[in-house]
Each structure stands twice: as C-alpha cells, then as structure tokens.
Image (cartoon, rainbow, N blue to C red):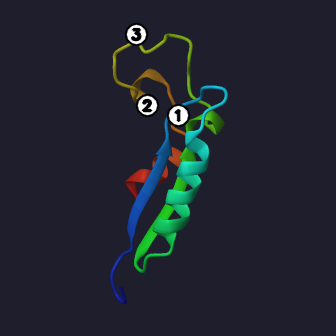
Amino acid sequence: MEGSRSLFIPVILGTTRQGRMSLNVSRLITQEVAKQNGIETELIDIATVSLPTGDAGEASGVWSTSIGITWPPVLCAIYR
C-alpha cells in the first residue's frame, strides 16, 4: 500500500480468567493478520493492562479522562 496508511487491526484478548484457552488463539490470529500486506496488528491482552477496578464501572458507565483515568498507551493505539 504505497503512499497510503496501513490498516490497523488490533486483536483484543478480553478475558483475564485463569486457565484461559483464548491466549493461544489470539496469538495465532495476530500472527496470521500480520502476514497480510498493508495491515498492522497488535495483540492487546487486558490481563497485562493496568485498568481501574475501584468502582466496578459504577462511576458513569463510560470511562473518560474527565473522571481522571489515563488510558494505557496500548489502548490508545487502537485510535491511530
């Protein structure tokens, strides 16, 4: 894709359960997507991202910087 931006497709592993089997599948999908021309990808594993847990989502229903949450850079990458 000469002269144009690459398409960014994040693979988001959205479970933190112990014994999760989806990690291997997520890695495989990330590897296969990365092989495609003009596509960038990254595996985002929420088990490794420091997210707030204090209010269990009760504050406003939507996370935003207006309530003092700083998004981890790995999540900000989704919106490149």
Q: How many angstroms separate mark 3 from mark 1 (CA)?
A: 17 Å
Select label 2 or label 3 by which is in front. 3
The amino acid pointed to by label 2 is Thr
The relative height of residue 46 versus residue 33 in the rendered view (above or below) is above
Residue located at (50% from left, 75% from top): 35
Q: Which residue is mark 2?
A: 65
- Is residue 72 depicted above or below 36 in this figure? above
Per the rendering, the mark at residue 70 is 1
Question: Which of the two labelled residues, at mark 3 and mark 1, occupies the earlier sequence position?
Answer: 3
| Quarter containing the C terminus | bottom left
> Residue 18: percent from the left, percent from the top?
66, 26
Q: On screen, 35 above or below 1? A: above
Depth check, front residue: 49 or 66 = 49
How packed mark 1 is, by other alpha carbons closer than 10 Å (few <14, some 14-19, many 20 or more), is few
Q: Secondary structure at mark 1?
A: loop
- Residue 59: give its label: none
Q: Which mark is residue 58?
A: 3
Q: Are marks 1 and 2 in contact (CB under 8 Å)?
A: yes
Q: Quadrant of the N terminus?
A: bottom left
Query: In terms of image quadrants, where is residue 67?
Result: top left
Give the residue type that dot 1 points to: Thr
